[in-house]
């Protein structure tokens, strides 16, 4: 029998109401109103995934992946393409670093007496990172022809904008007391920043640079789809010829490459966390070894790619570039074309939102199991396959159009978010008696204990990761149309293929404006959710 005090407690619990219930209800209603047209714009149709004809086509295509191609001749091509991919990523990041250092110095308000920012430098960084690297690669291929030079230049420009922005933000986030003290003693700003801020921010700066190199490896594969060399170009040829065995071998090598880059990145980050030994010189054996390895990698990459970048500064190259660039001006502003671009913007936005939402749900499901080993393998496979490769496969599964792009984004991003979600849940602060543990002891189900005990504490970090990926997905959604997945990318690819540069210019401007708008919206959402 239930005791009197237990009955009173149960009655009291039943009488409680969630104080945030009405706000959450209205939030859910508004979300449905906003998301419904976006799902419609992305062409979301689960029935197409279960269509018998589509399943037959995709089944036949995937069956061709087994067994992988292992011939000696193809192995030689694969090895050469792998080295080329690493070299493109290394040289592209080096160029990005050369651009980012002075731009971040001019753009940052760090080590200034007044917290002012250079709007011109900020604008240059916005333009550089706002145009996807695949678009830059496509433009450079048109000017300089097929080959790795286009990939290096494209990576250098886009990643230069990304590195410059993040470098500036890292420097601004550090304690500037020492730098301001140096300024007041008459030191130049460069000296104050070098000795007052850089030692504090060096670990985070190096960590982010290594992470960007890891991302550059993935990006260099994607750019190969437009003729910029490396594994991507080899993959594009295999997919067009429906040679599943070669495509499988390329994917396996690329997955191994991404995992090795990830392991190297993690090892370097752990090394940065180790407190250096007390010694007279800041340069120890480990630091010198890393520096020598870095220089050796740059020299080897330069020799392998055999690029004559100085030819870019000749009169003939300047004339060719000028003729090509002037073809983009003035942009086409006819009413019919602006309407087509507006439809492309809506499709691109819908692809990015739907893909990110599907990825967030799938990533959370994959992040929840306690036994991580098999699920980590799934996550690594999902995130190792580039979005353009997923888009080629999903286009076979559901047909050409924006739904294929949304599914491709969802598959790749689920691997990224699943890993980040799992780490966020594992690293959530644990109190002596955690809320989830208290709820379990009170008899709540495991799912309710997670929803009301664990999830609220990790929610800010999970939301930040999701919004960050949405910012990245809007750029990728803008180029998935290169393989028939709709949006602005499809418009751009068609117009560049037909040499209609004025119309292509309008699309590129739309991509840039959409990227800026999403960056601002994401930043506003992060501030509103704090």
Image (tube, rainbow, N blue to C red):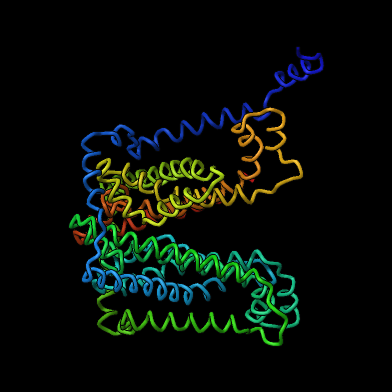
Nearer to us in this view, 15 or 351:
15
Count the numbered circles shown. Answer: 0
Report the side of 77 relative to 425 (left or right): left
Image coordinates of residue 147 in percent, x first then y, are: 27, 73
Instruction: Give the image quarter of residue 479.
Output: bottom left
Q: Which quarter shows the N terminus?
A: top right
Image coordinates of residue 369 in percent, x first then y, are: 53, 43
Q: Residue furthest bottom?
A: 280
Q: Residue furthest top?
A: 1
Can the viewer see residue 325? no
Nearer to us in this view, 228 or 359:
359
**What residue is rendered at 36% in x and 47% in y?**
348
Report the side of 288 relative to 516 (left or right): right
Report the side of 407 relative to 201 (left or right): left
**What residue is rendered at 65% in x and 63% in y?**
173
Image coordinates of residue 390 in percent, x first then y, are: 33, 51
Above or below residue 224? Residue 488 is above
Above or below residue 183? Residue 352 is above
Can the viewer see residue 1? yes
Nearer to us in this view, 111 or 382:
382
Nearer to us in this view, 511 or 295:
295
**What residue is rendered at 22% in x and 39% in y?**
56
**What residue is rendered at 74% in x and 16% in y?**
11
């Amino acid at each position: 029998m239930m005791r009197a005090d237990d009955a009173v407690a149960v009655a009291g619990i039943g009488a409680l109401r969630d104080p945030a219930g009405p706000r959450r209800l209205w939030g859910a209603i508004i979300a449905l109103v906003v998301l419904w047209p976006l799902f419609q714009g992305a062409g979301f149709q689960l029935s197409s995934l279960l269509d018998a004809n589509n399943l037959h086509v995709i089944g036949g295509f995937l069956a061709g992946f087994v067994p992988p191609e292992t011939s000696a001749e193809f192995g030689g091509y694969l090895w050469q393409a792998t080295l080329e991919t690493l070299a493109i990523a290394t040289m592209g990041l080096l160029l990005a670093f050369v651009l980012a250092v002075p731009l971040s110095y001019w753009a940052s308000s760090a080590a200034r007496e007044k917290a002012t920012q250079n709007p011109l430098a900020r604008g240059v960084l916005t333009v550089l990172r706002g145009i996807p690297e695949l678009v830059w690669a496509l433009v450079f291929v048109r000017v300089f022809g097929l080959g790795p030079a286009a990939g290096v230049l494209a990576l250098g420009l886009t990643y230069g904008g990304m590195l410059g922005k993040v470098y500036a933000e890292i420097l601004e986030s550090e304690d500037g007391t020492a730098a301001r003290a140096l300024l007041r003693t008459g030191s130049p700003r460069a000296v104050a920043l070098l000795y007052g801020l850089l030692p504090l921010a060096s670990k985070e700066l190096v960590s982010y640079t290594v992470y960007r190199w890891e991302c550059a490896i993935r990006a260099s594969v994607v750019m190969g789809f437009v003729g910029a060399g490396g594994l991507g170009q080899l993959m594009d040829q295999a997919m067009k010829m429906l040679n599943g065995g070669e495509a499988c071998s390329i994917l396996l090598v690329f997955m191994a490459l991404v995992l090795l880059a990830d392991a190297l990145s993690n090892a370097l980050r752990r090394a940065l966390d180790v407190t250096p030994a007390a010694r007279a010189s800041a340069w120890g054996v480990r630091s010198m070894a890393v520096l020598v390895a870095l220089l050796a990698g740059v020299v080897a990459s330069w020799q392998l790619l055999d690029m004559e970048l100085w030819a870019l500064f000749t009169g003939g190259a300047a004339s060719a570039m000028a003729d090509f660039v002037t073809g983009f001006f003035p942009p086409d502003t006819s009413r019919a074309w602006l309407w087509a671009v507006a439809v492309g913007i809506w499709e691109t936005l819908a692809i990015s939102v739907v893909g990110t939402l599907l990825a967030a749900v799938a990533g959370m499901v994959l992040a929840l199991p306690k036994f991580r080993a098999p699920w980590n393998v799934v996550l690594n496979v999902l995130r190792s396959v580039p979005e353009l490769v997923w888009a080629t496969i999903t286009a076979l599964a559901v047909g050409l159009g924006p739904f294929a792009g949304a599914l491709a984004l969802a598959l790749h991003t689920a691997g990224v978010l699943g890993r980040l979600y799992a780490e966020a849940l594992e690293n959530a602060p644990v109190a002596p008696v955690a809320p989830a543990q208290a709820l379990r002891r009170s008899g709540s189900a495991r799912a309710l204990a997670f929803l009301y005990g664990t999830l609220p504490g990790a929610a800010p970090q999970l939301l930040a990761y999701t919004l960050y990926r949405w910012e990245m997905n809007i750029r990728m959604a803008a180029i998935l149309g290169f393989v028939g997945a709709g949006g602005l990318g499809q418009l751009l690819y068609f117009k560049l293929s037909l040499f209609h540069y004025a119309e292509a210019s309008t699309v590129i401007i739309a991509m840039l404006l959409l990227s800026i708008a999403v960056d601002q919206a994401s930043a506003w959402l992060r501030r509103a959710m704090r």
